[in-house]
Image (cartoon, helix red, strand yellow):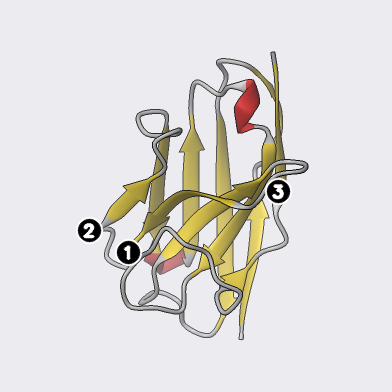
């Protein structure tokens, strides 16, 4: 079993920045890809970014490319998402996930491990 706890969400003005963190505990997760998804009210959960266990493979959604940076520190079992130049459309609950797979993917699965989410609200 893996537990994921996100932090760093909050209220920020458009153009501002936030840094999300996700600490993993339980089974060793350093060999799994990890990522971020988000869900806005009334919308489906959507892919944001994912990173392989080594950090050598990273994918971003087109909507966040150039503004968000995903990274991980395996020694600390922690995943990060640096979010810059935030927009009102970035408002959502952000979920951390550990993907039960060998290669990172853009699709989410019920079989993956998920955190409880952290709210990000961007005011215009």
Q: In what quadrant of the picture does the C terminus appear?
A: top right
In the picture provided, is 5 more to the left or to the right than 105?
Answer: right
The residue shown at (37%, 34%) is 65
Q: Are marks 1 and 2 in contact (CB under 8 Å)?
A: yes
Q: Which residue is mark 1?
A: 52
Q: Is residue 4 above or below residue 63?
A: below
Q: Nearer the viewer, residue 105 or 9?
A: 105
The correct choice, above or below, for 124 with respect to 112 in the image is above
The answer for how far apart the CA atoms under marks 1 and 2 are is 6 Å
Looking at the image, do the residues carrying marks 3 and 2 touch, with CB atoms under 8 Å apart? no
Q: Which mark is residue 118?
A: 3
Return the residue found at the far right.
Answer: 41
SS type, badge 3: strand
Residue drawn at (71%, 48%), measured in percent from left and top? 118
- Locate the N terminus by quadrant: bottom right
124 vs 73: above or below: above
Residue 99, x across and y down, in percent = 47, 72
The residue to which callout 2 is attached is 56
**Residue 40 % position (x, y):** 70, 41
Please indicate whether residue 55 sits to the left or right of residue 81 in the image. Answer: left
Evaluate if marks 3 and 1 touch, with contact meaning CB atoms under 8 Å apart: no
Crowd around label 1: few <14 · some 14–19 · many ≥20 (10 Å): many
Q: Please, what secondary structure does the residue beneath circle 1 have?
A: loop
Choose the circle earlier in sequence order: 3 or 2.
Answer: 2
Q: Secondary structure beneath disc 2? A: loop
Residue at 32 percent across and 78 percent down: it is 102
- The quadrant where residue 68 appears: top left
Looking at the image, is mark 3 or mark 1 earlier in the sequence?
A: 1
């Amino acid at each position: 079993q893996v537990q994921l706890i996100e932090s760093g969400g909050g209220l920020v003005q458009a153009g501002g920045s936030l840094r999300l963190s996700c600490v993993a505990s339980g089974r060793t997760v350093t060999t799994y890809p990890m990522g971020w998804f988000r869900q806005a009210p009334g919308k489906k959960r959507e892919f944001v970014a994912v990173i392989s266990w080594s950090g050598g493979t990273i994918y971003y959604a087109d909507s966040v490319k150039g503004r968000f940076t995903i990274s991980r520190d395996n020694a600390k079992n922690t995943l990060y998402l640096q979010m810059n130049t935030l927009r009102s459309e970035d408002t959502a609950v952000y979920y951390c996930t550990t993907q039960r797979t060998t290669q990172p993917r853009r699709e989410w699965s019920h079989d993956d491990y998920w955190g409880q989410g952290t709210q990000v609200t961007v005011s215009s």
